[in-house]
Image (cartoon, rainbow, N blue to C red):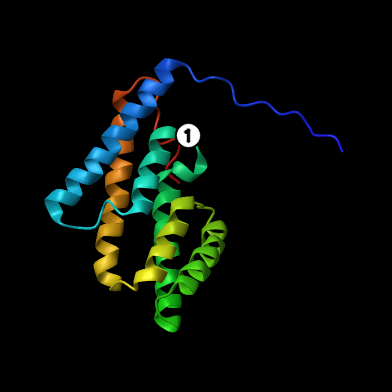
Amino acid sequence: MSVSSSQAPARVPIKTVVTATAAALVALLLLAGAADLTGLALFALPFTATAGIVALAPAAPFAQPRSIVLGHVSASALALAITAAAGPSLWTAAVAAALATAPMMLLRATHPPAGATAALIGLTAPDPVGFAVPMVAASGIVIAGGVILGRLLPGHRYPAYWR
Protein backbone atom coordinates (compact mmCIF):
# COMPACT_ATOMS: atom_id res chain seq x y z
CA MET A 1 0.00 0.00 0.00
CA SER A 2 1.44 3.32 -0.96
CA VAL A 3 1.00 6.42 1.07
CA SER A 4 0.60 9.60 -0.91
CA SER A 5 2.96 12.30 0.09
CA SER A 6 1.42 15.52 1.16
CA GLN A 7 2.89 18.70 2.37
CA ALA A 8 1.90 21.06 5.10
CA PRO A 9 0.72 24.47 3.95
CA ALA A 10 3.40 27.04 3.22
CA ARG A 11 4.60 29.14 6.13
CA VAL A 12 2.53 32.22 6.70
CA PRO A 13 4.44 35.51 6.67
CA ILE A 14 4.83 36.99 10.16
CA LYS A 15 3.04 40.16 9.05
CA THR A 16 -0.02 38.06 8.14
CA VAL A 17 0.17 36.26 11.50
CA VAL A 18 0.27 39.57 13.38
CA THR A 19 -2.57 41.07 11.30
CA ALA A 20 -4.83 38.03 11.69
CA THR A 21 -4.10 37.76 15.40
CA ALA A 22 -4.83 41.47 15.90
CA ALA A 23 -8.06 41.11 13.93
CA ALA A 24 -9.16 38.11 16.03
CA LEU A 25 -8.27 39.90 19.27
CA VAL A 26 -10.19 43.04 18.34
CA ALA A 27 -13.23 41.08 17.13
CA LEU A 28 -13.38 38.98 20.29
CA LEU A 29 -12.83 41.99 22.56
CA LEU A 30 -15.70 43.79 20.80
CA LEU A 31 -17.93 40.76 21.34
CA ALA A 32 -16.88 40.43 24.99
CA GLY A 33 -17.33 44.15 25.61
CA ALA A 34 -20.79 44.19 24.06
CA ALA A 35 -21.75 41.13 26.11
CA ASP A 36 -20.50 42.80 29.28
CA LEU A 37 -22.36 46.06 28.54
CA THR A 38 -25.65 44.49 27.50
CA GLY A 39 -25.80 41.38 29.65
CA LEU A 40 -26.71 39.40 26.51
CA ALA A 41 -25.12 36.01 25.83
CA LEU A 42 -23.08 37.33 22.91
CA PHE A 43 -19.91 35.47 23.81
CA ALA A 44 -21.43 32.04 23.18
CA LEU A 45 -19.05 29.64 21.48
CA PRO A 46 -20.65 29.74 18.00
CA PHE A 47 -20.15 33.49 17.81
CA THR A 48 -16.55 33.37 19.00
CA ALA A 49 -15.95 30.89 16.18
CA THR A 50 -17.68 33.27 13.76
CA ALA A 51 -15.38 36.09 14.90
CA GLY A 52 -12.35 33.85 14.44
CA ILE A 53 -13.39 32.92 10.91
CA VAL A 54 -13.93 36.56 9.95
CA ALA A 55 -10.51 37.46 11.37
CA LEU A 56 -8.57 34.50 9.97
CA ALA A 57 -10.30 33.87 6.64
CA PRO A 58 -12.01 37.14 5.70
CA ALA A 59 -12.29 36.23 2.02
CA ALA A 60 -13.80 32.77 2.58
CA PRO A 61 -17.40 32.34 1.45
CA PHE A 62 -18.47 31.13 4.91
CA ALA A 63 -17.04 34.32 6.47
CA GLN A 64 -19.21 36.69 4.44
CA PRO A 65 -22.07 38.65 6.06
CA ARG A 66 -24.70 36.82 4.01
CA SER A 67 -23.46 33.43 5.21
CA ILE A 68 -23.14 34.57 8.80
CA VAL A 69 -26.66 35.98 9.02
CA LEU A 70 -28.49 33.40 6.92
CA GLY A 71 -26.48 30.56 8.44
CA HIS A 72 -27.23 31.46 12.05
CA VAL A 73 -30.86 32.43 11.36
CA SER A 74 -31.72 29.32 9.33
CA ALA A 75 -29.89 26.96 11.70
CA SER A 76 -31.58 28.59 14.70
CA ALA A 77 -35.07 28.43 13.20
CA LEU A 78 -34.70 24.77 12.32
CA ALA A 79 -33.15 23.91 15.69
CA LEU A 80 -35.90 25.73 17.59
CA ALA A 81 -38.54 23.73 15.70
CA ILE A 82 -36.76 20.41 16.27
CA THR A 83 -36.20 21.19 19.95
CA ALA A 84 -39.83 22.22 20.41
CA ALA A 85 -40.90 18.86 18.98
CA ALA A 86 -38.34 16.60 20.64
CA GLY A 87 -37.25 18.46 23.77
CA PRO A 88 -33.69 19.39 24.67
CA SER A 89 -31.14 16.59 24.76
CA LEU A 90 -27.80 15.54 23.39
CA TRP A 91 -29.65 13.61 20.67
CA THR A 92 -31.73 16.65 19.72
CA ALA A 93 -28.57 18.74 19.55
CA ALA A 94 -26.92 16.21 17.22
CA VAL A 95 -29.96 16.03 14.92
CA ALA A 96 -30.42 19.81 14.89
CA ALA A 97 -26.75 20.46 14.09
CA ALA A 98 -26.71 17.88 11.30
CA LEU A 99 -29.99 18.98 9.73
CA ALA A 100 -28.97 22.65 9.91
CA THR A 101 -26.63 22.05 6.99
CA ALA A 102 -29.56 21.60 4.59
CA PRO A 103 -31.10 25.08 4.78
CA MET A 104 -27.67 26.69 4.76
CA MET A 105 -26.74 24.83 1.59
CA LEU A 106 -30.09 25.56 -0.04
CA LEU A 107 -29.66 29.26 0.79
CA ARG A 108 -26.07 29.18 -0.51
CA ALA A 109 -24.99 30.51 2.87
CA THR A 110 -22.98 27.86 4.65
CA HIS A 111 -21.45 28.97 7.91
CA PRO A 112 -19.97 26.13 10.03
CA PRO A 113 -20.42 27.85 13.42
CA ALA A 114 -24.17 27.96 12.74
CA GLY A 115 -24.19 24.19 13.22
CA ALA A 116 -22.88 24.81 16.72
CA THR A 117 -25.67 27.36 17.21
CA ALA A 118 -28.18 24.63 16.29
CA ALA A 119 -26.52 22.22 18.73
CA LEU A 120 -26.60 24.82 21.49
CA ILE A 121 -30.33 25.29 20.94
CA GLY A 122 -30.88 21.52 20.90
CA LEU A 123 -29.13 21.21 24.26
CA THR A 124 -30.69 24.16 26.03
CA ALA A 125 -34.12 24.88 24.46
CA PRO A 126 -33.84 28.65 24.88
CA ASP A 127 -36.76 31.03 24.60
CA PRO A 128 -36.94 31.83 20.85
CA VAL A 129 -37.19 35.61 21.32
CA GLY A 130 -34.65 35.59 24.13
CA PHE A 131 -32.23 33.74 21.85
CA ALA A 132 -32.94 35.75 18.69
CA VAL A 133 -31.86 39.08 20.15
CA PRO A 134 -28.32 38.06 21.16
CA MET A 135 -27.93 35.94 18.00
CA VAL A 136 -28.72 38.87 15.71
CA ALA A 137 -26.70 41.27 17.88
CA ALA A 138 -23.64 38.99 17.97
CA SER A 139 -23.81 38.47 14.20
CA GLY A 140 -24.05 42.22 13.65
CA ILE A 141 -21.17 42.97 16.02
CA VAL A 142 -18.90 40.41 14.35
CA ILE A 143 -19.78 41.68 10.86
CA ALA A 144 -19.32 45.32 11.90
CA GLY A 145 -16.00 44.47 13.53
CA GLY A 146 -14.90 42.71 10.36
CA VAL A 147 -15.86 45.71 8.22
CA ILE A 148 -14.00 48.11 10.52
CA LEU A 149 -10.93 45.89 10.60
CA GLY A 150 -11.12 45.54 6.83
CA ARG A 151 -10.79 49.31 6.57
CA LEU A 152 -8.06 49.69 9.20
CA LEU A 153 -5.73 46.74 8.72
CA PRO A 154 -3.61 46.61 5.58
CA GLY A 155 -4.27 43.49 3.55
CA HIS A 156 -7.39 42.57 5.54
CA ARG A 157 -10.25 43.16 3.10
CA TYR A 158 -13.72 42.39 4.47
CA PRO A 159 -16.27 41.65 3.27
CA ALA A 160 -15.44 40.12 -0.09
CA TYR A 161 -19.13 40.49 -1.01
CA TRP A 162 -22.46 41.30 0.62
CA ARG A 163 -24.97 39.24 -1.37
Q: Is residue 140 visible?
A: yes
Number of marks in picture: 1
* 150 to 95, vertically: above or below: above
Where's the N terminus, which quadrant? Answer: top right
- Residue placed farthest to the top in the image? 14
User: Neighbour class for label 1 at 10 Å: few (<14), some, many (≥20)?
Assistant: some
* 159 to 68, vertically: above or below: above
Q: Position of residue 59 (x, y in %)?
A: 47, 34
Q: Is residue 111 visible?
A: no
- Residue placed farthest to the right in the image? 1
- Return the residue nearer the eye: 98 or 54: 98
Q: Position of residue 94 (x, y in %)?
A: 51, 67
Q: Is residue 52 left or right of residue 94?
A: left
- Residue placed farthest to the front in the image? 1
- Residue placed farthest to the left in the image? 37
Q: Quadrant of residue 116?
A: bottom left
Residue type, label 1: Ala
**Residue at left offset 39%, top offset 40%:** 52
- Return the residue nearer the eye: 32 or 91: 91
Q: Position of residue 131 (x, y in %)?
A: 28, 66
- Return the residue nearer the eye: 121 or 63: 121
* 72 to 94, vertically: above or below: above
Q: Which residue is the site of mark 1?
A: 59
For label 1, the SS is: loop
**Residue at left offset 54%, top offset 60%:** 101
**Residue at left offset 39%, top offset 69%:** 123
Q: Is residue 56 left or right of residue 137?
A: right
Q: Position of residue 47 (x, y in %)?
A: 34, 50
